[in-house]
Image (cartoon, helix red, strand yellow):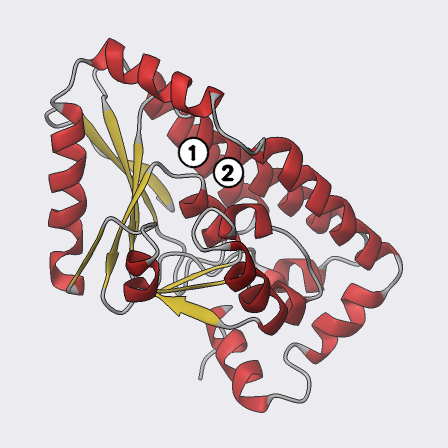
Amino acid sequence: MPVSTSVPDGGVAVVTVDYAPVNALPVRGWYDLADAVRATGRDPGVRCVVLAAAGRGFNAGVDIKEMQRDSGHEALIGANHGCYEAFSAVYGCEVPVVAAVQGFCLGGGIGLVGNADAIVASDDATFGLPELDRGALGAATHLARLVPQHLMRALYYTSRTATAAELHAHGSVWRVVPRADLHAAALELAHEIARKDGTLLRLAKAAINGIDPVDVHRSYRFEQGFTFEANLSGLAARVRAGFGGANPTRERELTQEQGDPA
């Protein structure tokens, strides 16, 4: 199954996303992920969730090809609502969520990890929002939870990425390990968390979310409004048609991220 959940072990459950080849999620995938995270968080036997992904990258964002095949706006609306639900599920999960990130973490992937409680990353992990290259806007809310404000803006405007080591230096990544050690490192942190009392952990999660300085739900919905504006004006379609425009190297990278053969 593209989204699967492991049987809890020591209070830790793992939700794994596997949309070959690069984990660019279709509309249904975002909703399935949201459902899996919410169901796992409600399980009284779970005290921590690890959010993981199979394959060479953690998440390549939404399935752009699904949007390109859609002559109307159904796929856009579905993707926006689906992303909102998945991001909200991670943020609102009743227990802490540890994201285990390998390879690329782009677009919607930033929304997931930005709303997680902790991040463990492989040393080849990169994080970024190529939204402007895709005719979209959004998830700056979540990137701002990973890097300082001015760096967030520079990364957003340029579509550049930051490495796991750079995010570790900013304090947003808990630990950086070789890819072969990623799963074990994420489970190690999750099991340390899960040794706490389950009821107290749920209270702690609610308390921490309650004092968050930014309302991530409202902030992200505000961003999404500009994505709709770009689409309704036809601007987004023109950008997506170029899909990288005058930067052939970047265009090739983005195409490969979305699943086209090299």
Instruction: Find residue 233 and report its horizontal and vertical position in percent.
Output: 89, 60
* Proximity of marks 1 and 2: CB atoms separated by less than 8 Å: yes
Which residue lies under the disc numbered 2?
A: 87
Compare residues 247 and 63 and report the one nearer the observer. 247
Task: Write the residue at 73% across / 75% down.
Answer: 241
Residue 61 in sight from this viewpoint: yes
Task: Write the residue at 86% across / 64% down.
Answer: 234
Compare residues 130 and 259 and report the one nearer the observer. 130
Quadrant of the snapshot with the C terminus: bottom left
Q: Which residue ends up furthest to the right in the rendered image?
A: 233
Q: Which mark is residue 90?
A: 1
Q: Which mark is residue 46?
A: none
Location of residue 236 (image quadrant): bottom right
- SS for tag 2? helix
Q: Amino acid at mark 2?
A: Phe
Against 92, residue 122 (above or below) is below
Task: Write the residue at 45% across / 80% down.
Answer: 261
- SS for tag 1? helix
Quadrant of the snapshot with the N terminus: top left
Compare residues 134 and 68 and report the one nearer the observer. 134
188 sits left or right of 228 in the view? left
